[in-house]
């Protein structure tokens, strides 16, 4: 979470330092249809605004003449809004005091968003070592996804019971931006740019908005990224989704990597359930070292990973007993079980025999957009 300074601290830190920026630069689209541009900041303070006298001129009527400044003081870089009309935002949050920023942070000046970056200082002879072109390309691609929302949500069916009754959908993101078509590649690149949490939150909002507008019934399973904190801010964001887009039964999927203190995780579940939101433990059985500890929190659902269930019913499946034992333990705790990644009739039959209550996989439907 970005920290804001109080007015006293603000006065002590805004010293109008003119120290060199040592490789700091802004990158992004300076207009709606403009290509990605890199703007070096040769010295700080660096003034951004609509006025041509500014260090960076943004040609947008939403941007104030002197909109904001980026300054360097006490060994840190800060962005400060200059009483602009439409505000300055850091990683989506409007700022009211000088706010510390770092590499990969997104700074929005009214309707124009740029990313703060820094060249890497490497050799002893003062040479700046930086693969700017590669980094620039990644920023350009991610700006297409996040800045221009060039992404779409696909929904994969989840069915219940032996009769495969429609129950809900898992929301999965897709983009046609070259090189990022795979969700794994998309989030890997987002991680490199420090944008994985923002992308994940945007996916949840778009998934909720799209399915509500389509008026398709069913429980909506929403994913989280392992780097996202399972805290009050997450709970508040989900509450806001329900308030903004209307009633919908939601289940939030989390992975072991996102679980820190087990007692805080238990409190997180209580807060979700108080909003009518379910909690699912995702990818169950994939190398987790804390299975029993996390299961003790009693999530509402456990999603058994496809690696555990996809070969069930085959002569080569040597772990059917293990899956049955894990399922029995979850059922004893009153946790609903879901087998994902099912493709063959043999695997489906084996999962039904074990007693799984919910099923997901290509056998029941591939991820598809709603339009």
Image: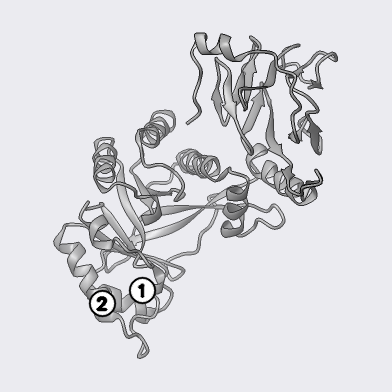
Residue closer to the observer: 218 or 194:
194
Residue at 44 percent of width and 32 percent of height: 245
Q: Which of marks 2 and 1 is nearer the N terminus?
A: 1
**Mark 2 to mark 1 CA distance (whole Å):** 9 Å
Q: Which residue is drawn at 28% across and 45% down?
A: 265
Say which residue appears at 35% left-offset and 82% top-offset: 346
Which residue in the rendered view is the most extreme toward the left?
A: 332
Instruction: Give the vertical position of 13 relative to 227 (above or below).
Output: above
Kindly state the secondary structure of the residue where label 1 is placed.
helix
Say the numbered circle drawn on residue 322.
2
Label annotation for residue 308:
1
Whether residue 195 sits left or right of residue 332 in the image: it is right
Q: Can residue 218 be seen in this view?
A: no
In the rendered view, does 207 fall on the left or right side of 188? left
Residue 260 at x, y percent in the picture:
34, 48
Is residue 98 something that shows in the picture? yes
Please determine whether, in this image, residue 20 is positioned above or below residue 274: above
The residue sitting at the front extreme is 124
Identify which residue, 309 or 90, lies in the foreground.
90
Q: Residue 337 carries which label?
A: none
Q: Nearer the viewer, residue 323 or 125?
A: 125
Circle count:
2
SS under mark 2: helix
As displayed, is residue 8 above or below residue 116? above
Q: Do the residues labelled 2 and 1 touch (CB within 8 Å)?
A: yes
Question: Quick one: label 2, few (<14), some, or many (20+) residues within 10 Å?
Answer: few
Quadrant in the rendering for residue 341 = bottom left
């Amino acid at each position: 979470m970005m920290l804001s300074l109080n007015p006293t601290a603000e006065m002590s830190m805004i010293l109008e330092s003119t120290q060199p920026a040592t490789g700091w630069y802004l990158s992004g689209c300076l207009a709606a249809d403009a290509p990605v541009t890199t703007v070096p900041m040769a010295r700080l303070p660096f003034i951004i605004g609509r006025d041509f006298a500014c260090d960076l001129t943004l040609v947008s009527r939403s941007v104030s003449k002197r909109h904001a400044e980026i300054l360097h003081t006490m060994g840190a870089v800060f962005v400060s809004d200059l009483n602009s009309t439409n505000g300055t935002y850091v990683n989506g949050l409007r700022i009211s005091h000088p706010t510390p920023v770092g590499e990969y942070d997104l700074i929005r000046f009214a309707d124009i968003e740029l990313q703060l970056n820094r060249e890497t200082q490497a050799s002893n002879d003062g040479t700046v070592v930086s693969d700017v072109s590669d980094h620039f390309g990644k920023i350009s691609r991610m700006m297409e996804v996040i800045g221009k929302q060039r992404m779409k949500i696909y929904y994969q069916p989840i069915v219940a019971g032996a009769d495969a009754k429609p129950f809900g959908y898992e929301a999965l993101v897709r983009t046609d931006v070259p090189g990022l078509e795979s969700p794994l590649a998309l989030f890997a690149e987002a991680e490199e740019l420090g944008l994985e949490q923002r992308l994940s939150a945007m996916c949840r909002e778009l998934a909720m908005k799209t399915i509500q507008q389509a008026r398709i019934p069913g429980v909506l399973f929403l994913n989280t990224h392992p780097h996202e904190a399972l805290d009050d801010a997450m709970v508040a964001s989900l509450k806001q989704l329900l308030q903004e887009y209307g009633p919908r039964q939601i289940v939030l999927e989390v992975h072991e990597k996102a679980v820190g203190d087990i007692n805080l995780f238990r409190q997180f579940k209580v807060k979700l359930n108080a909003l009518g939101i379910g909690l699912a433990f995702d990818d169950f059985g994939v190398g987790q070292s804390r299975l029993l500890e996390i299961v003790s929190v009693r999530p509402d659902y456990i999603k058994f990973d496809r690696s555990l269930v996809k070969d069930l019913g085959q002569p080569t499946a040597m772990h059917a007993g293990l899956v049955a034992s894990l399922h029995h333990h979850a059922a004893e705790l009153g946790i609903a079980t879901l087998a994902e990644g099912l493709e063959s009739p043999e695997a489906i039959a084996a999962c039904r025999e074990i007693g799984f209550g919910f099923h997901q996989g290509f056998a029941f439907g591939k991820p598809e957009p709603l339009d």
